[in-house]
Amino acid sequence: MDDDVVLSAPLFAAIDPEAAQALFVSMKPLRLPRGHAVFHEGEPGDRLYVIGSGKVKLGRRSTDGRENLLSVLGPGEMFGELSLFDPGPRTATASAVADATLYELSHAELIGWLERYPAVAKHLLEALARRLRRTNEALADLVFADVPGRVAKALLDLSTRFGEPAEDGLRVAHDLTQEELAQLVGASRETVNKALADFASRGWVRREGRAIVLLDRDRLERRAR
Ligand code: CMP
């Protein structure tokens, strides 16, 4: 069931179970099939979403049509809150890379919730700070790290969300196309492919369609540094 996953989101942290359940029940579930967007960059936004199942990518498009992925989020994670804390248009397009179930909460309801349970704001701030940390790191990597280093880092980051133990390593079913993986790393598809092929030939990873099995995390971690 999605309940436990959604209730693990920062929105519900440190709240008594009854109140948390009451908020969860008031949230509207929404099915988002793979490839469909829940909102687009630039649109006005008045609600946020918690992911119950599936995967959601947050992407931005340049004026000449190129795409960049800010993040790929999974169950228990939240998005769509920036346009509340800093009123303005959506800063990214959110679309499903794997069939997803989302739980929707209006910004107005969130404000009421924060007024009733101010402690929740601390957990939301923590989540925002973590995101800023990660974004800073990605920004520095774009400037200082080479593409294989960024690929190694992206795989490790995806593994913290989507990794599942397999016989010979950690299987990361990221569901991203090669193009999307390249957009996440901020490099061309060819360069990212070359890095992956190199990792595979060294025995660090095994490629399985839209999943990658991490066979040697230590080497990947060293390469990501
Ligand atoms: P909002 O701007 O309302 O809509 C797009 C959402 O994408 C945004 O809220 C955040 O929830 C999310 N988002 C924006 N930038 C990042 C980022 N760098 N990392 C992760 N999520 C982000």
Image (cartoon, helix red, strand yellow):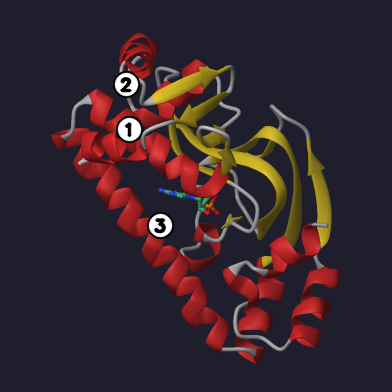
Q: Is residue 9 above or below residue 97?
A: below
**Do the residues bearing badges 2 and 1 touch, measured as CB atoms within 8 Å?**
no
Callout 3: CB less than 8 Å from ligand 1? yes
State the separation of the CA atoms marked 2 and 1: 13 Å
194 or 48, which lies in front? 194
Q: Secondary structure at mark 3?
A: helix
Direction from residue 142 to residue 32 in the image, left or right: right
Q: Residues within 10 Å of mark 3 (few under 14, many from 20)?
A: few
Q: Say which residue appears at 79% left-offset and 57% top-offset.
A: 2
Direction from residue 150 to residue 44 in the image, left or right: right
Query: On the image, numbered disc 3 is attached to which residue?
Result: 131
State the separation of the CA atoms marked 3 and 2: 21 Å
103 or 91, which lies in front? 103
> If the image is split into quadrants, where does the N terminus sit?
bottom right
User: Which dot marks residue 187?
Assistant: 2
Q: Earlier in the sequence, mark 3 or mark 1?
A: 3
Query: On the image, numbered disc 1 is attached to which residue?
Result: 152
Q: Quadrant of residue 43?
A: top right
Q: Earlier in the sequence, mark 2 or mark 1?
A: 1
Q: Secondary structure at mark 2?
A: loop
Q: Is residue 81 above or below residue 195?
A: below
Q: Nearer the viewer, mark 2 or mark 1?
A: 1
State the separation of the CA atoms marked 3 and 1: 19 Å
116 or 2, which lies in front? 2
Amino acid residing under circle 2: Ala
